[in-house]
Structures are given as C-alpha cells and as structure tokens.
Image (cartoon, grey):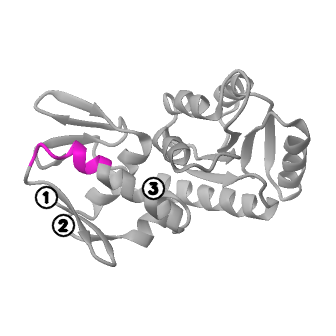
Amino acid sequence: MYTVLLIEDELALGMIVKDSLEVRGFTVLYAADGVAGLAMFLQEHPDIVVADVMMPHMDGFSLTQQIRQTDLDVPILFLTARSQTADVVRGFELGGNDYLKKPFSLDELVVRINALLRRTIGSRSRVAESDWVYIGRYQFEAHKQKLSLDGQDVLLSHREAELLRHLYEQRNHVLERNAVLMALWGDDSLFNGRSLDVFITKLRRHLRDDPTVQIVNVRGIGYKLIV
C-alpha cells in the first residue's frame, strides 16, 4: 500500500481527492498549505507527493525546492491551473515529475500516480552506478546534480540531471525521443516534447566548453550524446 501526501488548499477538492484515492487503496496524508505539507513530508516520508502550485504560506514550486534538498527520488506531481509553458518548465526544473491541469479527472490522476510510482520503483531497483562519471572533460555527479569542468561547478536542475543521466547511459547511441518522454514525463505529448527540447538546449549550453562532447539530433528518432 502506497502513501500519498496530498497538499491542496481548497478543502472541498482536497477531501474529494483524498476519499477517491483511499477508495482505490492508497493511504493519504492531507495538508492544506505548503508549510504544513513540508513538515508532514519530513516526518512521514510518503511514497509520492501530489501538490497544488498556488498555495498560501509556501507555493508548490518552493515546496519542491525544499523537498529536493533532502530527497531527490520521491515523485512529485503538480496540480495546477497554470499551463503556461514557462510555468511548467520551471516546475520540471525545480524537480517536479509531472503535472495535471485543473479541472482534472480523478481517474487520470490515479493513472499518473501509478505511472510515477512504477518509474520510481524501477529506478530504485537498478544496480547503483558510480558516484560520478566523466563526460569528455566534464565530471558529472548525477545524485548531486553537479557538472564540473576545470574546478568550476554548475548545479543542474533536477530534470537536467535526469535527462543527462539518460543520455550518458545511451552515450554514442540514439536515445529515442518517445522513450525519454515516457521515462521522465510520463507521456509523449507535443507539449512535453517542447519541454524536452528546452532541456536539451540547456544541456548543450552546459557542455559547450568541451568540443569533443555533443548532443546531436537524430531526425525523426531522438538524440545522441557523442563523447
């Protein structure tokens, strides 16, 4: 039985979602604002966090930043009325794993929660990798979300580090676009595809000081990290 931490300031909606998830077999912890939600997260260590973005005291983005300081793995799903590309990209950069636009279907929420839990379990069950690897002249520490070159460190966002890890695992081979969208976003919609393009552009900037390292487009298929 999985434990869901639900953080939603609309009490009526929160109770509806809580009851619906409990009927489906989840244990649900409920908090009405970001500060209370963070305290509950640190105390209870839930399997997944479902959080509204616009909340009093601490919004969902700030909450995610705080959570990622202590836990890089727990999946975080945003409930949001904000669907601007910049807002969604920012949520992913801070460490969110998925988002669901209000109003939403409870069935879709359950599907997305289960998909995130499956991906997290699969990730945790893999054989542990080295603490750091070389990508050309760069030293990459995925767990610390850090890329280093000649003593200079760049802190990556959670999503940048996840994407670079996937590229590195398939280095010198094609990483299929649909596969990475499903692995990191949970679906391969056009909107998420655009978000992926944004993160690829960011990684290219981070890696531009070593000309032996390139991320190239493989038209119609995906990307290749050439080292």
Q: Residue at x 74, y 63 (%)?
A: 108
Image coords of residue 49 (percent x, y): 66, 42
Q: Nearer the viewer, mark 2 or mark 3?
A: 3
Taking the spot 26% from the left edge, 33% from the top edge, the residue there is 154
Seen as rendered, the residue at the extreme bottom is 220
- Kindly identify which residue carries mark 2: 172
Point out which mark residue 13 bears. none
What amino acid is at disc 2?
Asn
Residue 27 percent location from the top left of the image:
80, 46
Which sits in the foreground, 183 or 70?
183
- Mark 1 Cα shell of 10 Å, populated few (<14), some (14-19), many (≥20): some
- Which is more toward the observer, 68 or 60? 60
- Mark 3 and mark 1 lie on one chain; the one further toward the N terminus is 3
Q: Left or right: where does residue 85 sit relative to residue 165? A: right
Cα distance between the residues tagged 2 and 3:
23 Å
Disc with the residue nearer the chain's start (1 vs 2): 2
Does residue 45 appear in the picture of this structure? Answer: yes
* Residue 197, quarter of picture: bottom left
Determine the secondary structure under disc 1: loop
Say which residue label 3 marks. 195
Where residue 44 appears, as percent x and y from the top left, is 70, 31
The answer to which image quadrant residue 103 occupies is bottom right
Q: Amino acid at mark 3?
A: Ser
Is residue 198 magenta-colored?
Answer: no
192 over 137 or under it: above or below: below
Magenta-highlighted residues? 202-210
Quadrant location of the C terminus? Answer: bottom left
Is residue 127 something one can see in this rendering? no
The reply to whether callout 1 and callout 2 are in contact (CB within 8 Å) is yes
Measure the C-alpha gap from mark 3 to mark 1.
24 Å
Please tell me the numbered disc located at residue 227: 1
What residue do we see at 85% from left, 46% from top?
A: 18
